[in-house]
Image (tube, grey):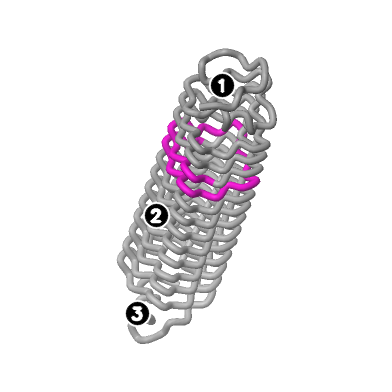
Amino acid sequence: MKAKRLLERYESGQRDFFKASLAGAKLGRADLSGANLIGANLKAATLRRANLDGVNLYRANLCAANLNRARMKEANLIGAGLDEARLRGAKLPRASLSACNLSQAVLEFADLRGADMVGANLRGARLNKANLGNANLRRADLRDANLVGADLVAADLRAADLSDADLRGADLSAANLEGATLARANLRGAKLRGTRLREANLTRANLAGARMSKAKLRDVLLNEAALRGANLGRADLRQSDLRGANLHGARLRKADLRGANLRGADLTGAKIKPKTLARAKSLKGALMPDGTRYTGKPREGN
């Protein structure tokens, strides 16, 4: 179907374009709000600044499509193919994107507040400065994704895979990352105040300068993680694995370290009371706040 013919039919009141063939169509700034485009082929189509609010694009092919600054509020994109699509600055609040393929897609500055992205494939996607506040990203694949400066406040990322993702300066305050994988992720300077990370994997993650006060880190893998200068005040680190972690200059005031494993960790210059350290399960070989190597149980005191 030609783009001109589609628009003529839409103007005449038609809304059903089930499995329409529109590969490479030029539909920039078009108004297709509320249209049924289930299974449509829009591969490499131009939909820049188009109005797609409420559109049904279930299992549609939008691979490599240009959707920059398109309006897609509450659109149905479940199971759609959007790999390598461009959605820079697109408006997708409360859109349905579960099981959607967005691998290598460009979503810089996109508005995805409250979007349903359960099980979505976002591997290698560019989401820097995107707004994902309150989005549902459970079990999403975000490996190697760029989330620099992204807003993930109160987002649901349970069991999501963020291995090797770049989250520098991202705001994950009050987000739920229980059971998530963040191995080798870069969270330098990220905000994780009150974030739930129970049983998450942060092995070798970079959390230097991260703000993690009151974070829920029980049973978390933080072995060999970089936590230099991080704020972990009042954080729950019970039974956490911090073997070989770099906590140089970290703030751990009133943190709960009961049962934590700090074997071989670097605590040089860390702000922590001896009685707090005394609750750790193991400090064998650790560098203590005064720079000395641990040789025995620290005395409880100031």
Labels 1, 3: front one: 1
Mark number displayed over residue 118: none
Label 2 sits on what residue type?
Answer: Asn
The image shows residue 120 at horizontal and vertical percentages of 57, 57
Distance between the alpha carbons at the discs numbered 1 and 3: 68 Å
The image shows residue 49 at horizontal and vertical percentages of 32, 62
Distance between the alpha carbons at the discs numbered 2 and 1: 35 Å
Q: Quadrant of residue 2?
A: bottom left
In what quadrant of the picture does the N terminus appear?
bottom left
| Residue stretch in magenta | 186-215
73 to 219, vertically: above or below:
below
Label 1 sits on what residue type?
Answer: Asp
The image shows residue 171 at horizontal and vertical percentages of 42, 47
148 to 63, vertically: above or below:
above
Residue lying farthest to the front in this orientation:
301
10 Å crowding of disc 1: few (<14), some (14-19), many (20+): many
Which residue corresponds to mark 3? 8
Label 3 sits on what residue type?
Answer: Glu
Give the residue at x 50% y 33%. 252
Q: Secondary structure at mark 1?
A: loop
Residue closer to the observer: 242 or 149: 242
Tag 3 or tag 2, which sits nearer the N-term?
3
Which residue corresponds to mark 1? 266
Q: Are marks 1 and 3 in contact (CB under 8 Å)?
A: no
Which residue corresponds to mark 2? 131
10 Å crowding of disc 3: few (<14), some (14-19), many (20+): few
212 is within the stretch colored magenta: yes
10 Å crowding of disc 2: few (<14), some (14-19), many (20+): many
Tag 3 or tag 1, which sits nearer the N-term?
3
Q: Secondary structure at mark 2?
A: loop
